[in-house]
Amino acid sequence: MTPNAITLEELTLNQDHLNRSRRRLLAMAAVPAVLLPATPAHAVLDWLAERAADNRRKRYGTVLDKMLVDAFYVLQEDGKKEGLVPALREAGYRLNGLNPDLLAMQKFIVNTGDMASADEKMRALVPDLDADPVAALYASAGRGRGNAVKAYKPALSGRLNRMYKQPLVFGQGRVEWYDRDLSFIEWSPQGRAVSLLLHAYQASTSLGVFLTRHSTVMFGTANARHVENSLRNSELAEFELRTL
């Protein structure tokens, strides 16, 4: 036998070793991620959490009116959590979106059972300005920087709501009401629009019909100028309820 010759027995042993290695690799591939060693899994989760936090910080950095947004919105310094201020959370509101010129929140009102009941409830709605925590924070923020905040009747709210793209999910089994609540505009001492607060309602079919109030704060030059350019001064005067 030459020095480099391999016996049949050695060849069989090598083949068995390869087969065992192959089966071991296949078994590892089938192990769920949750059963893998903790350190790599935690590293991935930490990376995802930090990336999400970084995105929140960047998004907040694009906000055009942080002074106004800060009256409603809370972002922890590390960016790992965001939400609404305690007064709104306790009142049942939750954050629905933050953009450079918009802050959206919503509150579940009631499960009406069917659309007819939802429509009946909306027709019977009587806005209560003094019991609106969103309006209270909005008015306080506007007055706090030397501006005037005015409340407007539902008839004008319908027009204002339709002037802007609403951050709602539309589709079959959903109905919206734009002219059932008050609306609000913040005015500078020079009579220029600064921001606005709109309320809209939506009923959506699920296990019953869920009625939700959507409250949207809009700001930035484009939104403010759109108010001034679209509404006549006589309309604003006609539908003004009062200055807060």
Image (tube, helix red, strand yellow):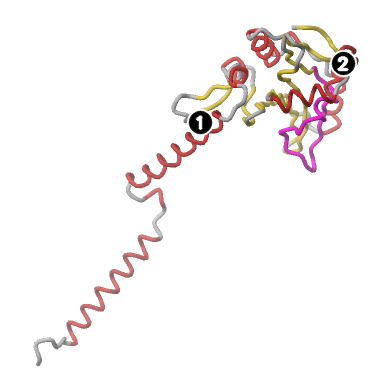
**Looking at the image, which is closer to me, 211 or 46?**
46
Q: Is residue 86 magenta?
A: no
Disc with the residue nearer the chain's start (1 vs 2): 1
In x, y percent, where is residue 5?
A: 14, 88
Q: CA distance from mark 1 to mark 2?
A: 39 Å
Residue at x-position 78% and y-position 42% = 171
In x, y percent, where is residue 31?
A: 39, 56
Residue 232's image quarter? Answer: top right
Residue 223's image quarter? Answer: top right
Residue type at mark 1 is Arg
In x, y percent, where is residue 96?
A: 64, 30
Q: Which residue is mark 2?
A: 233
Instruction: State left or right for residue 196 relative to residue 137.
Output: right
Crowd band around label 1 with a 10 angstrom C-alpha radius: few (<14), some (14–19), many (20+): some
Callout 2 secondary element: helix
Q: For the C terminus, give its image quadrant.
A: top right
Q: Magenta span covers which residues? A: 159-182
Q: Which residue is mark 1?
A: 57
Q: Is residue 176 magenta?
A: yes
In the depicted structure, whether residue 80 falls above or below residue 92: below
**Looking at the image, which is closer to me, 18 or 192?**
192
